[in-house]
Image (cartoon, rainbow, N blue to C red):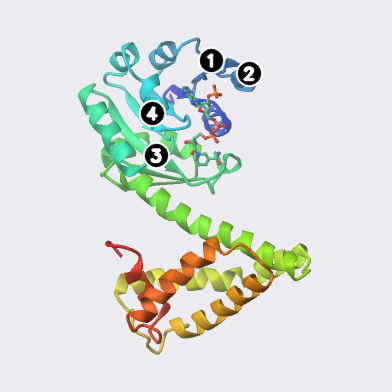
Amino acid sequence: MKPAITVLGTGRMGAALAHALLKGGHSTTVWNRTIEKTAALAAAGATVAASVLDAVEASEIIVVNVTDYPATAVLLRGDVASALRGKLVVELTSGTPNGAREAGEWATEYGVTYLDGAIMATPDFIGTEHGTILVSGPRQVFEQSKEMLQALGGNVQHVGDDLGLANALDSALLALMWGSLFGALQSIAVCRAESIDLGELARQWTATAPVVEGLVTDLIKRTEAGRLAADDETLSSISPHYSAFRHLVELMDVRKIDRTVVDGYDAIFRRGIAAGHLHDDFAALSQFMGEAG
Ligand SMILES: NC(=O)c1ccc[n+]([C@@H]2O[C@H](COP(=O)([O-])OP(=O)(O)OC[C@H]3O[C@@H](n4cnc5c(N)ncnc54)[C@H](OP(=O)(O)O)[C@@H]3O)[C@@H](O)[C@H]2O)c1
């Protein structure tokens, strides 16, 4: 028989998690601060707990998905912390690496088994084969919980025993995502200024996205291998990138488009060029991102 699961927090993501657990055949108890948000889950077969304590007492595995770790800390204190002794808490709320490590220390103090996860998906991906959830914590605990976790997403991966790793990878991947989203904001501004239909931008982005994906993957691999100087496999050195970048900046100045984001790019280009890397691979810029770079 599949283990009963409690889900604390049924906002957009928590509700999707609870629906996926029900669909996966788990007896599911839910609690939410605003009880009205549990109505659809009750209709789908979930038990709605009147208090966090009742919810925690209903299952041996507690999935938490609220806004942030401070909210989790308030929910899991006092009697609730005592009731969690010997149970597994799977924290799927977004947070920082150190936030997860501190939560791990709290769990050890209260005799709670703890996994920390980062959901790399929107609610519509939860419960599907493309739902990616990164999990850190003791591998043995992960393996024991894998079936339940796979009900939440087909691509559930253990990323390491260090509890902070899932959140660290989450931030790294979100940095990539925001690079694309803020890049899109600039593209939209350029198209509007130049009277280019946004449907055309969408079509050309679809056509060129594989090139960008290839460049990003190449950059990561070359940086990992330390291949920062240009060689026969270099796709583009810093020099042509910077020339094209200057065209963008000129256009933005002429059209009075906000330069906040591109000024950051310019600063990094300039650091690399000043250090003599104009004709090196773009990956050479990885050295100019701060102390760890
Ligand atoms: N949505 C996404 O695409 C997505 C993707 C990846 C990760 N996540 C992460 O999942 C978590 C939830 O996101 P969401 O999109 O579901 O947000 P949401 O719809 O705004 O839901 C937030 C949830 O947190 C609860 N909450 C907030 N503060 C609380 C407190 N002090 N005490 C008790 N409960 C509290 C809310 O309760 P009430 O209903 O009472 O307000 C609600 O259940 C976040 O950490 C988010 O970063 C979301």
Which of the two residues, 125 or 10, is positioned nearer the viewer here?
A: 10
Mark 1 vs mark 2: give the one in front: 2
Residue at the image point whose x is 40% and y is 87% from the top: 279
The residue singled out by tag 2 in the image is 39
Does the residue tagged 4 have its C-beta within 8 Å of any atom of ligand 1? Answer: yes
CA gap, disc 1 and disc 4: 26 Å
Q: Is residue 81 toward the left or the right of residue 25 in the image? A: left
- Which of the 4 image quadrants contains residue 125? top right
Instruction: Report if the CB atoms under discs 3 and 2 are less than 8 Å apart.
Output: no
Under tag 3, what secondary structure?
loop
CA gap, disc 3 and disc 2: 28 Å
The residue singled out by tag 3 in the image is 95
Where does the image place residue 41, in percent across and percent down from the top left? 60, 22
CA gap, disc 4 and disc 2: 26 Å
CA gap, disc 1 and disc 2: 10 Å
Instruction: Report if the CB atoms under discs 1 and 2 are less than 8 Å apart.
Output: no
What is the tally of numbered marks visible in this picture? 4
Mark 1 vs mark 3: give the one in front: 3
The residue singled out by tag 4 in the image is 70
Residue at the image point whose x is 40% and y is 20% from the top: 75
Does the residue tagged 3 have its C-beta within 8 Å of any atom of ligand 1? Answer: yes
Does the residue tagged 2 have its C-beta within 8 Å of any atom of ligand 1? Answer: no
User: Is 177 located above or below residue 52 in the figure?
Assistant: below
Mark 4 vs mark 2: give the one in front: 4
Q: Residues within 10 Å of mark 3 (few under 14, many from 20)?
A: many
The residue singled out by tag 1 in the image is 47
Under tag 1, what secondary structure?
strand
CA gap, disc 4 and disc 3: 10 Å
Instruction: Report if the CB atoms under discs 1 and 3 are less than 8 Å apart.
Output: no
Which three-letter amino acid code belongs to the residue tagged 1?
A: Thr
Which three-letter amino acid code belongs to the residue tagged 3?
A: Gly
